[in-house]
Amino acid sequence: MARSSRPRKRQRGSIDVLPSGALRVRVFAGRDPLTGRRHSLTEIIDPGPRAADLAERARTRLLNQVDERRNPKTNATLDQLLDKHLDLIDVEGTTLRTYRGYVDTHIRPLVGSIKVGAFDADLLDSFYAELRRCRAHCDRRRYVEHRTSREHECDDRCRRHVCKPLGDATIRQIHFILSGAFKRALRWRWVSVNPMTQAQPPAAPKPNPRPPSATEAAAILNEAWKDPDWGTLVWLAMTTGARRGELCALRWRHVNLDNGVLEISSSVAQDSSRTWEKATKTHQQRRIALDPDTVTVLQEHKLRRSSEAKTLGLDLAEDAYVFSLDPGNRTHLLPDSVSQRYGKLVARLDIDTHLHNLRHYSATELIAAGVDVRTVAGRLGHGGGGTTTLRVYSAWVSESDQRASHSLFARLPARPEPTTRTELAKTQPQAPYEKVAASLRADILDGALKPGEPLPTLTEIASSAGVSVGTAHRATTLLRDWGLVEPGTARRPAVVSSNPKS
């Protein structure tokens, strides 16, 4: 019998017997895009009477994944994914530095060496639980946290380590970093599913702005005014709610003193010693109306800076910075230096606050004064048409609503006294006894029953009205409540008056 000339088709995938008796199923899935090495999908089948059948099914399933392009294309670790993700992500330099800090401190030491295809909901829940246990990721052994790594004599600054959880806001930031990285991995087909969709990060913490009180704000301003230039910056931060970087980037061409308008279009960012000008946080320009006192403060500040520049033979250019240590105002202030100086100021006053709280102070004072939320959002540069403002300052908005409701009530006319059922029965009788009483009342008012005359007996009233004696009794009681009758002789009520005051 002649053999077929058709070549035998080579079987894809392999099933190998391991020394333990288990079966290893291996299917070629292409070249790893990172290393160029062969990338295979493997699955181990425990030994047993049905091991061969289960292994064949596993080989078929893995081959289907490869054919349908549902398999991960790489054995890359999370470290390798994060390296590529951080190189490609489009964020500001300060934000990127923050992300790299979270990655190097909290992600790489714990799960950086794990392959991206091994991440699942169970692993991520354990990871978040560890972040909530200890921010230093200690091994639960007792040790002393020394104040420096150099040789030193320990003092009270070298203390025994106490585990402190990582804040919910920080854990959410780490979650967002991982979510962005795995979205890229899914698009690159490094993973077949995105495990972050199954992760449960902590709920977003509720905003709790803590602006200084009116007394604290007054003390801060009085201390700041010892240096008029510094006092002007603190004043402007309070009245406009501008961020520190926006104040540092402010130039005189952005200030229209004639119309009392301030334009905020850029901000100064700082990364260690490096600074640069960039767009505002929400990438939008805004114009802020200035009150007369603020206009006066800025006029005096400009006159003072111009005089100091002329003393040195310099001119204050229109493009000069509003706040500067340079005599000609040609360089801006450093945002970190502004925060440090403000921190020293409030420390001298023993006030627990920081510079950004002046922004909260401006917002809460505007809301308390009855300014609508959209206007407050526009002055602060919040996006979302006021959504952020409502979320952050919901407590103050609620208080403002309560004050508005009280003001509205004060302007409304007094509401009429509520009418009781007894009074309504005179003109709108409903129950049988009310109808009998209303009929008798009409006889009294018409003069059919004169003052001093007794009412008919209860039996007579019941018979004429076709009601029971009890109903007739309730009718006479209602006449007494109306002031038309009073108890008379022989227990028969007598008519009091045909024109009662009631």
Image: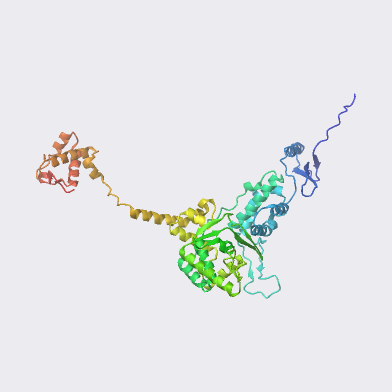
Question: Observer-nearest residue: 17 or 173?
Answer: 173
Residue 166 or residue 413, whichever sits in front = 413
Q: Is residue 346 visible?
A: no
Q: Quadrant of residue 430?
A: top left
What color scheme is it? rainbow
Q: Is residue 490 above or below residue 278?
A: above
In this view of the protein, can residue 490 be seen by the observer? yes
- How far across and down, in percent of the image, does residue 244 sit? 57, 63
375 to the left or right of 26 = left
Residue furthest to the right in view is: 2
Spot occupied by residue 433 in the image (x, y as percentages of width and height): 21, 39
Depth check: give the residue in front, 333 or 36.
333
Residue reaching furthest to the top:
1
Residue located 11% across and 46% down the image: 488
Q: Residue at x 49, y 65 (%)?
A: 295
Which residue occupies 58% across, 72% down?
A: 309
Q: Where in the figure is residue 121, as x and y percent of width and height?
A: 64, 48
State the image coordinates of residue 442 (x, y, percent, origin top left): 16, 39
- The quarter in which the N terminus is drawn is top right
Instruction: Name above or below for residue 455 compared with residue 160.
Output: above
What is the number of callouts on the image?
0
